Amino acid sequence: MKTWTGLENLQYLANIKKVCSDKELMDLIKVFDLENVIEKKYKTYSLGMQQKLRIIQALMDNPKYLILDEPFEALDKKIKLITRNYLDMYLSKDPNRKLIYTSHDETDDDFTDCILEINDRTIDMI
């Protein structure tokens, strides 16, 4: 079984729906600072590199509703800021776009309009 590179993974997914051009894909790879490692095998990626690849995968469809699970986990401080700035810009381009994400890190609270907390099978707005 062939082990794919990060780029091969992204290209395969992009070709499924034909929603992301090669240029758009390379632009995202540059934004998330993966251009120096994108040709390496995915299995060699650190957790942070894998996380950046997952964020690119989520964004390349240009979804109206972007749902991310722990998007800032395993990212260093620089990439976390780049990710937040990019997500801000992405959302501001279309007021109908919405971001829903989970986080166990309370420092992510400043990146939200609304916080919901799940405790004992109930959802509370904070």
Image: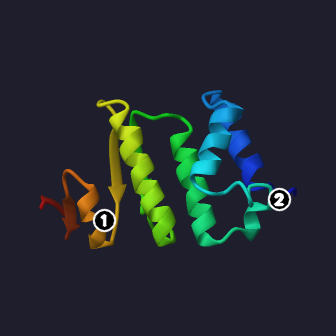
Q: Secondary structure at mark 1?
A: helix
Specify whether 88 is left or right of 75.
left
How packed is label 1: few (under 14 Cα within 10 Å), some, or many (20 or more)?
few
Alpha carbon separation for disc pair 1 and 2: 34 Å
**Based on the displayed image, in which of its 4 quarters is residue 28 positioned?**
top right
Image quarter hosting the C terminus? bottom left
Residue at which label 1 appears: 108
Expressed as whole percent of the image width and height from the top left, the position of residue 95 reads 29, 31
Identified at 27% across, 71% down, the residue is: 106
How packed is label 2: few (under 14 Cα within 10 Å), some, or many (20 or more)?
few
Front-lying residue, 85 or 113:
85
The numbered mark at residue 3 is 2
Front-lying residue, 2 or 76:
76
Mark 1 vs 2: CB contact within 8 A: no
Front-lying residue, 77 or 52:
77
Q: Nearer the viewer, mark 1 or mark 2?
A: 1
Can residue 66 be seen here? The reply is yes
